[in-house]
Image (cartoon, rainbow, N blue to C red):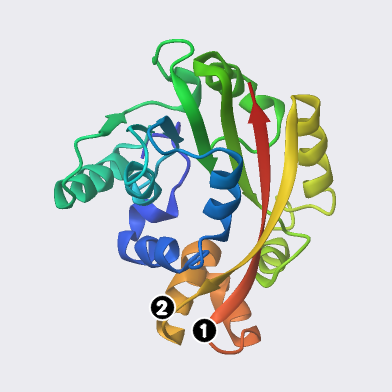
Amino acid sequence: MDEKFYPYTGATNPTAYEHWNECTDPDYLLEKLMWEIAPIEGKMVLDVGAGSGFQTVRYASKAFRVFAAEPDPRMLRQIYLRLAKNDLANVSVMAASAEEITLPSDSIDVAYARFAYFYGTDESLPGLREIQRILKPGGHFFVIDTNPDQGQFGKMARQIYPEIYTPTYVEERADFYKEHGFERFEVDTVIRAPNRDILGDILKLDFAEHYEEVLPTVEGNEISYSLSVYHFKE
């Protein structure tokens, strides 16, 4: 695998990744928040780090046009397979990372980065500048991240990956985004699976061999999941 690409779990287990997308925020609380702030009907939309294109297709049902930017060829294959199954003429796929988007300046109304590229550190500044360049005046940019301070999923993530989700993880990222003109929102949602087997597959996707440690701590087929949403308006 090319080391420039994040070791995307969805690339090695697309079935479990599809379950993850289907079962995460099933009541669409995240979309409700974002679309109240920035409606996308008839708009030009950019999906940064589009993964398998799951969200791209949802955006395309409302937007005038959606650009799906994804650098990983393994995930691009999944996007093309998804688009082949959906009769969509308003989606364009770009093999590009956030800092490499070649769209014209002032061309995008709303951009999204959902668990992709923008992790609240200076390393994401090239991509941030590129997104700001292509936003129209009054355009919006949303960055979605896990909040390990709240919710069962976040606390599991901190337990398994303490070197990533440090005690100051949220505070540091909130400060970073505030410095660069973002406001912060919190969405408390859930991961709701139809059965324990699928929930186990989802947890295995994120926690690998450690999922056997966390699955017994969950009752039923649902876990709480808190998201930090950072919003920038041009």
Closer to the camera in the image, 194 or 9: 194
Closest to the camera, between mark 1 and mark 2, is 1
Q: Is residue 125 above or below residue 151?
A: above
Q: Residue at x 71, y 31 (%)?
A: 121
What residue is rendered at 41% in x and 82% in y? 194
Q: Quadrant of the N terminus?
A: top left
**Residue 155: x and y, percent?**
72, 67
The amino acid type, in three-letter code, at marker 2 is Ile
Residue topped by disc 2: 198
Q: Secondary structure at mark 2?
A: helix
Quick one: quadrant of the C terminus? top right
- Amino acid carrying mark 1 in the image: Asn
Number of other residues with Cα within 10 Å of mark 1, as a class: few under 14, some 14 to 19, many 20 or more:
some
Image location (x, y in percent) of residue 124:
62, 27
Question: Could you say where residue 201 lies in the image, as x and y percent from the top left?
Answer: 43, 73
Query: Which quadrant of the structure image shows residue 231?
Result: top right
Indicate whether 153 appears above or below 87. Answer: below
Is 12 on the left-hand or right-hand side of 78? Answer: right
Between the C-alphas of marks 1 and 2, the distance is 9 Å
Name the disc covering residue 221, or none.
1
Task: Answer with the quarter of the image where residue 23 lies.
Answer: bottom left
Is the C-beta separation of discs 1 and 2 under 8 Å?
yes
